[in-house]
Amino acid sequence: MLQEFKKFALRGNVVDLAIGVIIGAAFGAIVQSLVSDVLMPVFGAATGGLDFSNHFVPLSDKITADSLDEARKQGAVLAWGRFLTLTINFLIIALVLFFVVRLMNRMLHAEAEKAPALSKQEQLLTEIRDALQQPARHATGA
């Protein structure tokens, strides 16, 4: 059973997936920092100091706190500011991934287009191969 597990764990797909998850987690942390440390403060400054991280709607009359963390300790809250921040995170991640995949596709197509031209000999061999693959014609000219 140990050999089977080793064979499974060392297959390319499992290792590729593990690397993807680790890189994805690191990428998520970078985007989280970009949104919370760069974009939202700039957006807050542009809107007169608006900070979404502590915006919430209390769902109980018992909640008197001004910060989200303290309000959650007092009861149920609808943390729409946090939801908005996470939605922006998702949109930025999706946009960046779109551009990364788009760039990779362009690079793959560029490599395919750079294929060297066939030599005369290769062209003749290709024509012979194609002629051999065509259905045999009868001597009657059909």
Image (spheres, grey):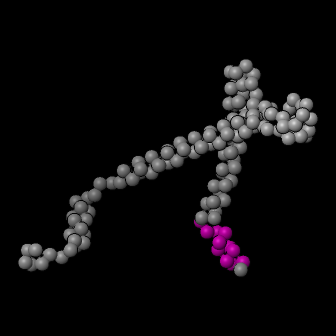
Q: Over which residues does the magenta segment extend?
A: 2-12
Q: Quadrant of the C terminus?
A: bottom left
Who's the residue at 59% across and 65% down the image? 12
In the figure, 112 relative to 67: above or below? below
Give the side of residue 11 with respect to residue 103, left or right: right
Q: Quadrant of the N terminus?
A: bottom right
- Along the line of sight, which residue is nearer the eye, 95 or 127? 95
Magenta stretch, main secondary structure, is helix
In the figure, 66 relative to 139: above or below? above
Q: Residue furthest top?
A: 48
Q: Position of residue 24 (x, y in %)?
A: 66, 50
Give the side of residue 101 with respect to residue 25, left or right: left
Q: Position of residue 79 (x, y in %)?
A: 78, 37
Q: Quadrant of residue 69?
A: top right
Is residue 117 highlighted in magenta?
A: no
In the figure, 128 relative to 68: above or below? below
In the figure, 41 relative to 111: above or below? above
Q: Residue furthest left?
A: 140
Q: Quadrant of residue 10?
A: bottom right
Q: Position of residue 140 (x, y in %)?
A: 7, 78
How many discs mark residues in the rendered view? 0
Give the side of residue 77 with respect to residue 130, left or right: right
Who's the residue at 21% across and 74% down the image? 135
- Along the line of sight, which residue is nearer the eye, 136 or 82? 82
Q: Position of residue 6 (x, y in %)?
A: 68, 73
Q: Is residue 104 visible?
A: yes
Who's the residue at 57% across and 45% down the image? 97
Who's the residue at 64% across and 74% down the image? 7
